[in-house]
Amino acid sequence: MGTFSLFIKRLRRNFRGGLLLFFCLVIIPGCVSTGKPQMQTESYLIDYKVPVFEKFAKIDDTVRINRFTIATAYNNSNMIFRQDGFSLDSFNYNHWAVNPADMVGDNLLRDLQESGYFRAAFSRYAVDEGRYVLQGGIEEFYLRTDKSGNAAVISLEITLKDIKQREATKRIIYQKKYRQEELLKDNSPRGYCQAMSLAMQKLSQQIIVDAYLAARSSENK
């Protein structure tokens, strides 16, 4: 019995030692610093002042902006850059805070509301369907890096529909492609964001004026 008891005690001691070793090797390293500082991830949003709009008479109808679609290559939060038509890459520790489709749509809605061109402008979440529906798709949204210089590139396709038109063929009253490039003043992710913001500011102004004129023309028919 004495030999058996001694064997049991050694077995328990070895088990406890093995369990302690397991915790040291598997769990503890995750809490111990390696001494190397971790890279901090930065998130960016396009931001700019509302464009200055020419004064026009307000249209007494509402408009709703649907969620923008976006080309698959850019349908994520990566800050993408391209050197040519074949290659595509992104920054490791810098990204957009939200999907570019939402950034573009949210800024366009804000600018449309500030323009005062329509009785009201609603987001895609609104219950009011609106007489007019503005929808769009992002075809390009990236940083171009080549010999001609680093530039933020954005291209959109915009469509405005008049829901009150009974004939489906007459509902589309305006469709147009837009493209804007802005050279970077600062060759960094932040500089990329600033250039993209300026590009969006210019496109937003063009899109809203064109949409207003198309809607006004439609009401006069």
Image (spheres, rainbow, N blue to C red):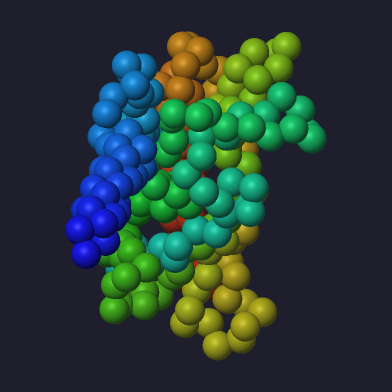
Taking the view exactly as shown, the residue that stands out farthest to the right is 86
- Is 153 or 211 nearer to us in this picture? 153
| Spot occupied by residue 65 in the image (x, y as percentages of width and height) | 41, 63
Image spot of residue 215 (x, y percent)? 47, 63
Whether residue 31 appears in this view of the structure is: yes
Instruction: Check the picture and name the quadrant holding the N terminus.
Output: bottom left
Judge whether 44 appears above or below 22 on screen. above
**Snapshot quadrant of residue 47:** top left
Q: Is residue 64 above or below residue 157?
A: below
Query: x, y (%) of residue 92?
Result: 50, 29
- The residue located at (63%, 54%) in the rendering is 72
Q: Nearer the viewer, residue 176 or 182?
A: 182
**Pick the front one: 29 or 133:** 29
Residue 184: horizontal and vertical position, in percent? 51, 16
* Nearest the eye: 125 or 16: 16
Residue at image position (66%, 79%) is 169
| Total residue callouts | 0
Q: Residue 141's quadrant in the figure? A: top right
Q: Residue at x 71, y 17 (%)?
A: 146
Looking at the image, is 149 positioned above or below residue 19?
above
144 horizontally vs 216: left or right: right
Q: At 33% from the left edge and 64% from the top edge, which residue is drawn? A: 123
Report whether residue 220 is seen: no
Question: Is 43 situated above or below 76?
Answer: above
